[in-house]
Amino acid sequence: MSNPHPRALAKAAPKNRPTAISAARKVAFDILLKVESRRAHSDDLLRGPAVESLSHPDHHLATALVLGVLRWQIRLDHQIQKLLSRSAKLDPEVRIALRLGAFQILFMDRIPARAAIDESVELAKQAGHRFASAMVNAVLRKLAAAPRAVFPQDSVAELALAEAHPQWMVERWAATYGLDIARDLCLHGQSEPAHVLRLADRAAEDELARSGVEIEPAQLLTAARRVIAGDVAGAAAFKEGRVRSQDEGSQLIAEIAAFAPRTGATRVLDACAAPGGKTLILAERLAATRIVACESSASRHEQLRQRLEPLGERVECRLADVTALPEDGVFDLVLVDAPCSGTGTLGRNPEIRHRLKPEDLQRQAERQRAILTAALRAVCPGGRVVYSTCSLEPEENEQVVAEVLANHPAIQEVSLAESIDSLVQRGIVVPTAADGLEQALTLQGAIRLLPGIFTCDGFFIAMLQRSS
């Protein structure tokens, strides 16, 4: 008799005894269904009360299940479809139950296949799909018993399937950056983002150590630390705001903006301020400056207002669309961290890949040009505008800047090479990062942070100056 497959299944539970669904799987199922059916955002839902009420192990499992299914959804659907009838049309609840089970079987070796299958079957039943639950059981059992599939990555199409990204997106990256960098971008999209902190001072670092949080220096900035282990959220320094989570690339944008004005800035506009991490850095670096922080979304504005409230009258939180601001030529500095496709953040926001369409990029670019044009109107002669996105797409980055410059002869692009040197000299940028940042400069002097080359999310940063 041959040895059983290492993932061989035990007998199913008796039909008259419902399988108990773990709290983590139930919460993950509910979140994935909201993301699928209501276009909700996983990062918001994973910070919600349903997740926060879980035990620490269940919190971790629910997060891993949600993000894992979203990251690998394209490949999961491909493998599931091969085991289905071609004519099978799945309801959202059944599709989510299949994806959850398949992800655990294929990517979570510590979870027994039986548990993954039985609970996925029960999830389908409790969602009102008792008849489909037999199909869920059969498909997942076949998947668990089959040899592990091998996915080559030699072509764009193969890479897209192997790393579960839309083929059109990988084709764009390969055409723009080359296949090797496209592969790095895909790998970043499938990886858990580094947990990076912003430290207010050395005392906060010592407090984290006493709280059992293990950290190490980050790649780019002296005030940034990467978390290795420990519960940051439980530390007093984190609760009091002296330590906060913020991607290192996001921090760098604010650091560049803070030292962009040629002379001391007295009035600064953060044009698209929510969630406020960059505003806090501007306030930290520009202690004598009044900041206007704009946000056009009412809910995000309220969150921004609460976060910036400790800064008092130094910061005015304004519910406003920057394109309709009345100020003309009054700000020394404007930071435009523009709304964008977010393709540089797919590891953190994996559902973007399932929603974004190629035609969306032009719509984003139109909005970005309007915001950047408004920012240039608001800045005073001699003042500077820092424009940034978390997109990897040229239409949202250098092409936006080029088109705005073409229509505004009084505006010039300023190379960020000088900013890099200045930030190194001020002890803000890690000296060993200077060469990498200089190599990341475009021909026009903007910075493009590509995941794989840098350990942060993908960002584009450019600086413009108004001469008159």
Image: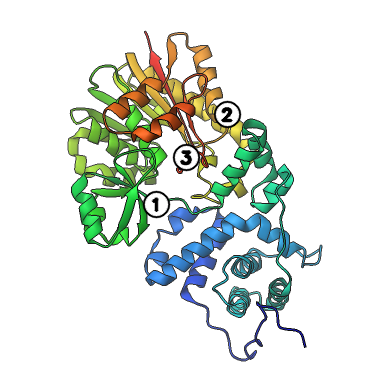
Distance from disc 1 to disc 3, alpha carbons, whole Å, reads 14 Å
- Residue 360 visible? The answer is yes
Image position, residue 427 (x, y; %): 27, 32
Amino acid type of the residue that numbered disc 2 sits on in the rendered structure:
Pro
Element on which disc 2 rests: helix
Q: Nearer the viewer, mark 2 or mark 1?
A: 1
Q: Disc 3 designates what residue?
A: 454
The residue drawn where x is 29% and y is 17% is 262
Image position, residue 24 (x, y; %): 47, 71
Observer-nearest residue: 107 or 360? 107
Q: Counting other residues with Cα less than 10 Å from the Cα at mark 3, is it few (<14), some (14-19), or many (20 or more)?
A: some
The disc, 1 or 3, on the residue closer to the chain's N-terminal end is: 1
Question: Which disc is residue 394 wearing?
Answer: 2
Q: Nearer the viewer, mark 3 or mark 2?
A: 3
Image position, residue 126 (x, y; %): 58, 77
The disc, 3 or 2, on the residue closer to the chain's N-terminal end is: 2
Element on which disc 1 rests: loop
Q: Disc 1 designates what residue?
A: 195
Question: Which disc is residue 33 wearing?
Answer: none
Image position, residue 390 (x, y; %): 48, 37
Amino acid type of the residue that numbered disc 1 sits on in the rendered structure:
His
